[in-house]
Structure formats: structure tokens, C-alpha cells
Image (tube, grey):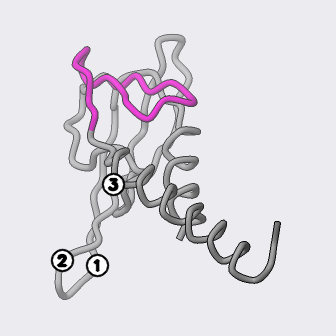
């Protein structure tokens, strides 16, 4: 339980992007047309191109951003800027609550089994 929460929080936190979307391609699983992923190419202000895949999970940044969108996502932050506007789409309260419940259950089990 806690590992899932830690994984999603960590994976979102380590993403680092700064630049303009110059290419975007979205594909979805067929035949239901769900579980979509978008492959972006982001060009930084110094001209470096980075490929980023926004998958169908909470830790990914938004999918379906149009070409020309400016993204600034700093490492160790869960929020990011899209065209200068703050995007807070990560369900932090859910995952931190999930993490807290998992830690509580682990401590409770430890004590139940005779731990000190």
C-alpha cells in the first residue's frame, strides 16, 4: 500500500522538463481506445530536445497538450507550469493519505506481532 504511494509520488517528483512542445503523438489501446499515452518532444530554451512520455498514470504530466505549449516542471516538485499557469493535477492528498494509512498499518502489525 505504502509502496504504491511512494512510487507515484517519487515518479512524479523526478520529472524535469523546461521548454516548448515541438512534437506530440498520442496512441491509445484498442479496441476500447483507452489507456492513452502521449510522446512529447520538448525543446529547451538552449535548443536541447528531450522526449517525454505521458502515460495513463497519476505520476505523468497531462496528455494531449498542443504543439507550442510551454512546460516548466522542476525536479522534486509535484506541480508544474503550463504556459505560465500553475497546474496542480497530482492527487497529493490521496497519495499522502494512502501513505499514512500504510505506515499506520505497518506499525500496528509490528506491535501486534510483539515488536517494541
Instruction: Calculate the distance from the C-alpha at mark 1 to the C-alpha at mark 3.
Output: 12 Å
User: Is 91 displayed left or right of 103 in the figure?
Assistant: left
Instruction: Calculate the distance from the C-alpha at mark 3 to the C-alpha at mark 2.
Output: 13 Å
> What residue would you read off at disc 2?
33
Residue drawn at 45 percent across, 25 percent down: 43
Closer to the camera in the image, 65 or 6: 6
> What residue would you read off at disc 1?
29
Secondary structure category for the residue under label 2: loop
Q: Which one is earlier in the sequence, the residue at label 3 or at label 2?
A: 2
Residue drawn at 73 percent across, 74 percent down: 110
Image spot of residue 75 (x, y percent): 56, 29
Label at residue 38: 3
Image spot of residue 82 (x, y percent): 26, 25
Query: For mark 1, does the 10 Å Cα neighbourhood hold few (<14), some (14 to 19), or many (20 or more) residues?
Result: few
Where residue 98 sits, quadrant-wise, is bottom left
Label at residue 47: none
Amino acid at each position: 500500500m505504502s509502496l504504491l504511494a511512494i512510487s507515484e509520488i517519487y515518479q512524479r517528483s523526478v520529472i524535469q522538463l523546461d521548454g516548448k512542445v515541438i512534437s506530440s503523438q498520442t496512441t491509445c489501446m484498442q479496441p476500447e481506445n483507452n489507456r492513452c499515452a502521449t510522446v512529447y518532444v520538448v525543446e529547451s530554451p538552449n535548443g536541447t530536445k528531450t522526449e517525454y512520455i505521458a502515460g495513463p498514470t497519476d505520476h505523468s504530466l497531462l496528455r494531449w497538450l498542443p504543439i507550442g505549449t510551454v512546460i516548466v516542471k522542476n525536479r522534486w516538485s509535484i506541480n508544474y507550469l503550463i504556459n505560465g499557469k500553475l497546474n496542480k493535477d497530482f492527487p497529493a492528498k490521496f497519495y499522502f493519505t494512502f501513505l499514512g494509512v500504510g505506515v499506520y498499518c505497518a506499525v500496528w502489525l509490528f506491535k501486534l506481532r510483539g515488536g517494541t
